[in-house]
Image (cartoon, rainbow, N blue to C red):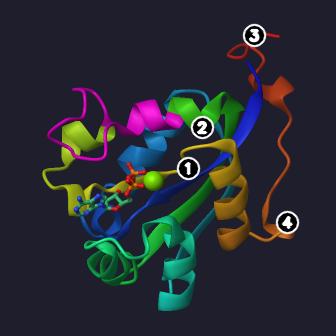
Amino acid sequence: MAIQRTLILCKPDAVSRGLSGEIIRRIEARGYLLIGMKLMQLDGERARKHYGEHEGKPFFGGLVDFITSGPLVAMAVEGDDAIEGMRQMIGATNPLQAAPGTIRADFAQQIGRNLVHGSDSHESAKRELSIFFSPSEIVSRKHDSHKWLVEK
Ligand code: DAT
Ligand code: MG
């Protein structure tokens, strides 16, 4: 078990559908800490950088158009094994394959409108967090304040 940081996005579909509160509620209910958060709209350059691994794939253009289409909520989330834990909570990329109880299964229908982004590895988390947050926008929070949730 290790304390990890991960980038979570409530994508424009989540914000426009009024689901960012529900998504944040689930993250906090799991006991993860929000250590950075902002509402912002991405420009194409930053969107292409964030989704760089998908450049050249048939859905890349649509993905960039969609992620830049409206405001999103970007969050830096911290907790025990938070990268894998958040991926579990978000569910499989295609909402049809996502397990019931995950955000995508509970609220989404289509792969191209699947509401949430979560970093998929330590390297991705590091890279993606630096695209969305400068170090001064990350707030250190003492895990002791959650000691009833986190096993030492
Ligand atoms: P994830 O968001 O689960 O990490 P990914 O990194 O493979 O999934 O893809 C990034 C996003 O791109 C995904 O959330 C939705 C979109 N996407 C992926 N595969 C797609 C496809 N076959 N058709 C349309 N959109 C797709
Ligand atoms: Mg991904």
**How far apart are the two marked residues, 1 and 4, measured between alpha carbons?**
18 Å
The stretch in magenta equals 86-102
As helix, strand or loop, the secondary structure at mark 1 comes to: loop
Q: Main secondary structure of the magenta part?
A: loop
Is residue 126 located in the magenta-colored stretch of the structure?
no
Q: Which residue is at 35% across, 71% downward?
A: 12
Q: Which mark is residue 83?
A: 2
Residue behind mark 4: 135
Question: Residue 86 vs residue 137: left or right?
Answer: left
Quarter of the rendered image showing ligand 1: bottom left
Q: Secondary structure at mark 2?
A: helix
From the image, tell me which residue sits under label 1. Answer: 119
Residue at 73 percent across and 36 percent down: it is 4
In the rendering, at what x and y percent does residue 66 appear?
Answer: 30, 77
Sooner in the amino-acid sequence: mark 1 or mark 4: 1
Can residue 35 be seen?
A: no
Q: Vertically, is 23 above or below 81?
A: below
Disc on the earlier residue, 2 or 4? 2
